[in-house]
Amino acid sequence: MKAIIVLSAISISLVSSDLLAQSKAKDKTAATQSLFIDVHKLEPGKVKFEDVSGAHEKDLAVQKKHGVEFLKYWVDEEKGLVYCLSSSADSNAIRETHKEAHGLLPDNIYAVTPGTEAPGAGGKTLFMDVHEMGAGKVTAKDVEAAHQKDLAVEGKHGVHFINYWVNEKDGVIMCLSEAANSDSVIQTHKEAHGLVPVSIFKVKQGQ
């Protein structure tokens, strides 16, 4: 009887230790996750949203193996651009996930700091506009201040800014908005702070 009790106690101890180790591993993974946006520059006019949706499903099927969580993606069918938002420990894990899932490797991967997301209003076209400020020449705090200026005048131009993401290292800012046309987005930025994007794309969103 004593031997059985001792063995039971050992088994419980081992199980508890294993669960504790798993819990610590999960906490460690969660603590080291960062947001990334990776950009695929594919052939203009040859990219269909449905095809990207299919590739995204393949990413989701293998992402856990690499410690990645894909959150959203945006597609510009006309220019052949795909933007993927994900949470990962590092950029290499994202690259390996795409490689195993479908073989379509990104041209750029940016570690990003997000703004505070606003719900989409719906009924208008989605646009992703990109600002290239130069390496090391922008901070998340600066972008937040500029974003607040956008929000103050967006209604005048019929624009609704949903969120932005900034990569401080390369000085890249990506803004997601709803508007009737791209010119309205540009005019909002111009009036708000004068920082006009170098490019703007009409996109469809998936997740």
Image (cartoon, rainbow, N blue to C red):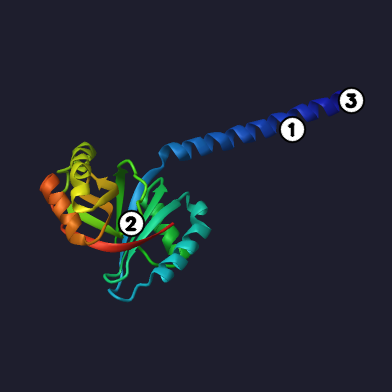
Which mark's residue is nearer the viewer, 1 or 2? 2
Q: Of label 2 and label 3, which has the lower sequence position? A: 3
Residue 171 visible from this viewpoint: no
Q: Amino acid at mark 1?
A: Ser
Mark 2–mark 3 CB contact (< 8 Å): no
Residue 98's mark? none
Q: Amino acid at mark 2?
A: Asp
**Label 3: which secondary element:** loop
Instruction: Give the residue drawn at x 76%, y 27%.
Output: 9
Residue 11's mark? 1
Residue 82, quarter of picture? bottom left
Q: Is residue 172 above or below residue 55?
A: above
Q: Amino acid at mark 3?
A: Met
Residue 1's mark? 3
* Residue 31 screen position, x and y as percent: 43, 36
* Residue 48 screen position, x and y as percent: 38, 72
